[in-house]
Image (cartoon, helix red, strand yellow):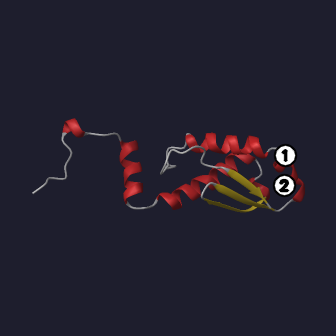
Amino acid sequence: MKDNRLSRKDAVGMDFLVKEYIREMKLSSGINRQRAMAAWSAVSGAAGYTVDVSFDRGVMCCVMASSVVRNQLYFQKDSLIARLNDFLEHDELFVRERNDGPVVKNLILR
C-alpha cells in the first residue's frame, strides 16, 4: 500500500503544488481565460471602454464600445501584444500547457 504523504526530501514549493493542482483538476483553461482578461484590463488602459474580452488558442478578441479608442489601440497592437505576453509570463496563476512561444499570438479589436 502506497502512502500519499511526501517525505521531507520530496518536499516541493507551494507555487509548484498550486500549478499541479490546477492541471490535475483541469482548471487551467478557465483560469487562463480569466487571467488573460485581467491582463487586458491592466495593460490596455481601456477597461472602461471594453464591452467583452474572449481568449482562445492564442487569440484575444476585444469588443470596444468606442470606435475612437479601438482605433487608438489598433495602432498600438504590437506593443499591446508584447505587454500582454509579458504580463501573463509573470502571472503566477497563469498555467502554460506548452512552452511554444508567446501566449497571445493575435489581438482582434472590434
- Compared across the picture, whether 32 is left or right of 62 comes to left
Above or below — where is 102 with respect to 65? above
Along the viewing direction, whichever of 98 and 79 lies nearer the viewer: 98
Task: Locate the C terminus by quadrant.
Answer: bottom right
Task: Locate the N terminus by quadrant.
Answer: bottom left
- Compared across the picture, whether 44 is left or right of 11 comes to right
Near mark 1 (Cα within 10 A), the count class, few <14, some 14-19 or many ≥20, is few
Looking at this view, name the residue that lies furthest to the left: 1
Above or below — where is 60 with respect to 83? below
Q: Residue at x 58, y 45 (%)?
A: 88
Near mark 2 (Cα within 10 A), the count class, few <14, some 14-19 or many ≥20, is some
Q: Are marks 1 and 2 in contact (CB under 8 Å)?
A: no
Q: Which mark is residue 85?
A: none
Looking at this view, name the residue that lies furthest to the right: 68
Residue 13 screen position, x and y as percent? 34, 39
Q: Residue at x 36, y 43 (%)?
A: 14
- Mark 2, secondary structure of its residue: helix
Along the viewing direction, whichever of 54 and 59 lies nearer the viewer: 59
- Compared across the picture, whether 89 is left or right of 66 comes to left
Above or below — where is 14 with respect to 28? above
Q: Quadrant of residue 33?
A: bottom right
Residue 61 screen position, x and y as percent? 71, 59
Q: Which residue is mark 1?
A: 75
Amino acid beneath label 2: Arg
- Mark 1, secondary structure of its residue: helix
Q: Which residue is mark 2?
A: 70
Label 1 or label 2, whichever lies nearer to me, is: 1
